[in-house]
Amino acid sequence: MEVLMKKNFIYIICFCLTFSIFFKAHAKSNVVFLIGDKFLSMCKDKELINQSACEGYILGVQDSISSGHLSNHFDLCFPDGVTPKKLRLNIINFLEVLPSMSKFSADNVVAKFLELNYKCKK
Protein backbone atom coordinates (compact mmCIF):
# COMPACT_ATOMS: atom_id res chain seq x y z
CA MET A 1 0.00 0.00 0.00
CA GLU A 2 2.80 2.43 0.91
CA VAL A 3 4.61 1.71 -2.38
CA LEU A 4 1.40 2.46 -4.31
CA MET A 5 1.00 5.79 -2.47
CA LYS A 6 4.59 6.78 -3.28
CA LYS A 7 4.09 5.80 -6.91
CA ASN A 8 0.89 7.87 -7.15
CA PHE A 9 2.64 10.80 -5.49
CA ILE A 10 5.43 10.64 -8.08
CA TYR A 11 2.86 10.55 -10.91
CA ILE A 12 1.10 13.60 -9.50
CA ILE A 13 4.39 15.52 -9.21
CA CYS A 14 5.37 14.57 -12.78
CA PHE A 15 1.96 15.64 -14.07
CA CYS A 16 2.19 19.00 -12.31
CA LEU A 17 5.69 19.65 -13.60
CA THR A 18 4.74 18.67 -17.15
CA PHE A 19 1.62 20.81 -17.01
CA SER A 20 3.55 23.84 -15.73
CA ILE A 21 6.22 23.48 -18.42
CA PHE A 22 3.88 23.19 -21.40
CA PHE A 23 1.12 25.57 -20.37
CA LYS A 24 1.81 29.17 -19.43
CA ALA A 25 -0.63 30.95 -17.18
CA HIS A 26 -2.35 33.91 -18.76
CA ALA A 27 -3.77 36.29 -16.21
CA LYS A 28 -5.95 39.27 -16.95
CA SER A 29 -7.83 41.82 -14.93
CA ASN A 30 -10.82 43.98 -15.70
CA VAL A 31 -9.55 46.90 -13.59
CA VAL A 32 -6.65 49.33 -13.97
CA PHE A 33 -5.87 50.93 -10.64
CA LEU A 34 -3.14 53.32 -11.70
CA ILE A 35 -3.35 55.29 -14.96
CA GLY A 36 -0.37 57.22 -16.34
CA ASP A 37 -1.66 60.66 -15.37
CA LYS A 38 -2.19 59.63 -11.73
CA PHE A 39 1.22 57.96 -11.78
CA LEU A 40 2.79 61.19 -13.08
CA SER A 41 1.14 63.18 -10.29
CA MET A 42 2.45 60.73 -7.71
CA CYS A 43 5.98 60.86 -9.16
CA LYS A 44 6.02 64.68 -9.29
CA ASP A 45 4.58 65.13 -5.80
CA LYS A 46 6.77 67.04 -3.33
CA GLU A 47 5.97 64.53 -0.57
CA LEU A 48 8.78 62.01 -0.12
CA ILE A 49 6.31 59.21 0.54
CA ASN A 50 4.72 59.65 -2.91
CA GLN A 51 8.11 59.91 -4.61
CA SER A 52 9.12 56.69 -2.83
CA ALA A 53 5.89 55.00 -3.91
CA CYS A 54 6.62 56.02 -7.50
CA GLU A 55 10.16 54.66 -7.31
CA GLY A 56 8.93 51.44 -5.74
CA TYR A 57 6.36 51.05 -8.51
CA ILE A 58 9.07 51.52 -11.16
CA LEU A 59 11.27 48.89 -9.49
CA GLY A 60 8.31 46.51 -9.21
CA VAL A 61 7.55 46.82 -12.92
CA GLN A 62 11.23 46.31 -13.75
CA ASP A 63 11.35 43.19 -11.58
CA SER A 64 8.20 41.82 -13.20
CA ILE A 65 9.70 42.44 -16.65
CA SER A 66 12.83 40.61 -15.57
CA SER A 67 10.95 37.58 -14.30
CA GLY A 68 7.77 37.72 -16.34
CA HIS A 69 6.46 37.38 -19.85
CA LEU A 70 8.04 40.57 -21.19
CA SER A 71 11.49 39.10 -20.71
CA ASN A 72 10.69 37.02 -23.81
CA HIS A 73 10.37 40.21 -25.88
CA PHE A 74 13.25 42.40 -24.76
CA ASP A 75 16.11 42.50 -22.28
CA LEU A 76 17.01 45.48 -20.16
CA CYS A 77 20.60 46.57 -19.54
CA PHE A 78 21.14 49.32 -17.00
CA PRO A 79 24.39 51.29 -16.98
CA ASP A 80 26.23 51.89 -13.74
CA GLY A 81 24.87 54.74 -11.69
CA VAL A 82 21.16 54.29 -12.48
CA THR A 83 19.17 54.93 -9.31
CA PRO A 84 15.46 54.76 -8.56
CA LYS A 85 15.46 58.57 -8.25
CA LYS A 86 17.02 58.97 -11.71
CA LEU A 87 14.45 56.58 -13.16
CA ARG A 88 11.63 58.53 -11.52
CA LEU A 89 12.90 61.89 -12.82
CA ASN A 90 13.37 60.47 -16.31
CA ILE A 91 9.88 58.96 -16.34
CA ILE A 92 8.46 62.35 -15.35
CA ASN A 93 10.26 63.85 -18.35
CA PHE A 94 9.08 60.99 -20.57
CA LEU A 95 5.43 61.59 -19.65
CA GLU A 96 5.74 65.36 -20.02
CA VAL A 97 7.29 65.00 -23.49
CA LEU A 98 4.76 62.33 -24.54
CA PRO A 99 1.53 63.27 -22.74
CA SER A 100 -0.45 60.79 -24.88
CA MET A 101 1.21 58.00 -22.85
CA SER A 102 -0.57 59.18 -19.70
CA LYS A 103 -3.83 57.56 -20.83
CA PHE A 104 -2.30 54.08 -20.54
CA SER A 105 -1.91 52.04 -17.38
CA ALA A 106 1.14 52.99 -15.32
CA ASP A 107 2.77 49.59 -15.76
CA ASN A 108 2.61 49.99 -19.54
CA VAL A 109 4.07 53.48 -19.27
CA VAL A 110 6.98 52.25 -17.16
CA ALA A 111 7.58 49.21 -19.37
CA LYS A 112 7.64 51.32 -22.54
CA PHE A 113 9.95 53.88 -20.92
CA LEU A 114 12.35 51.14 -19.81
CA GLU A 115 12.25 49.46 -23.21
CA LEU A 116 12.96 52.71 -25.08
CA ASN A 117 15.75 53.80 -22.75
CA TYR A 118 17.39 50.64 -21.42
CA LYS A 119 16.87 47.93 -24.03
CA CYS A 120 20.07 45.91 -24.43
CA LYS A 121 22.01 46.64 -27.58
CA LYS A 122 22.77 43.54 -29.61
Image (spheres, rainbow, N blue to C red):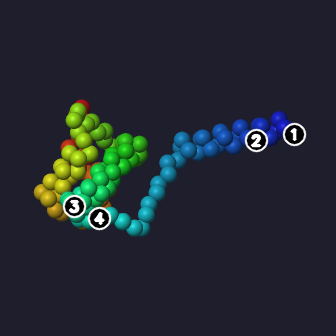
| Residue 92 placement (x, y as % from top left) | 18, 55
In this view, the residue in front, 7 or 105, is 105
| Residue 9 placement (x, y as % from top left) | 73, 41
Dot label at residue 8 = 2
Q: Residue at x 71, y 38 (%)?
A: 10
- Residue where numbered disc 1 is placed: 1
Q: CA distance from mark 2 to mark 3?
A: 57 Å
Q: Residue at x 36, y 65 (%)?
A: 33
Q: CA distance from mark 1 to mark 4?
A: 57 Å
Secondary structure type for disc 4: loop
Closer mark to the observer between disc 1 and disc 3: 3
Dot label at residue 35 = 4
Q: Amino acid at mark 4?
A: Ile
Rate crowding at label 2 as few (under 14), some (14 to 19) or many (20 or more) other CA atoms within 10 Å.
few
- Residue where numbered disc 3 is placed: 45
Rate crowding at label 1 as few (under 14), some (14 to 19) or many (20 or more) other CA atoms within 10 Å.
few
Please say if the residues under marks 1 and 3 sit with CB atoms less than 8 Å apart. no
Secondary structure type for disc 3: loop
Q: Which of marks 1 and 2 precedes in the sequence?
A: 1
Can you see residue 108?
Answer: no
Q: Amino acid at mark 3?
A: Asp
Q: Which of marks 2 and 4 precedes in the sequence?
A: 2
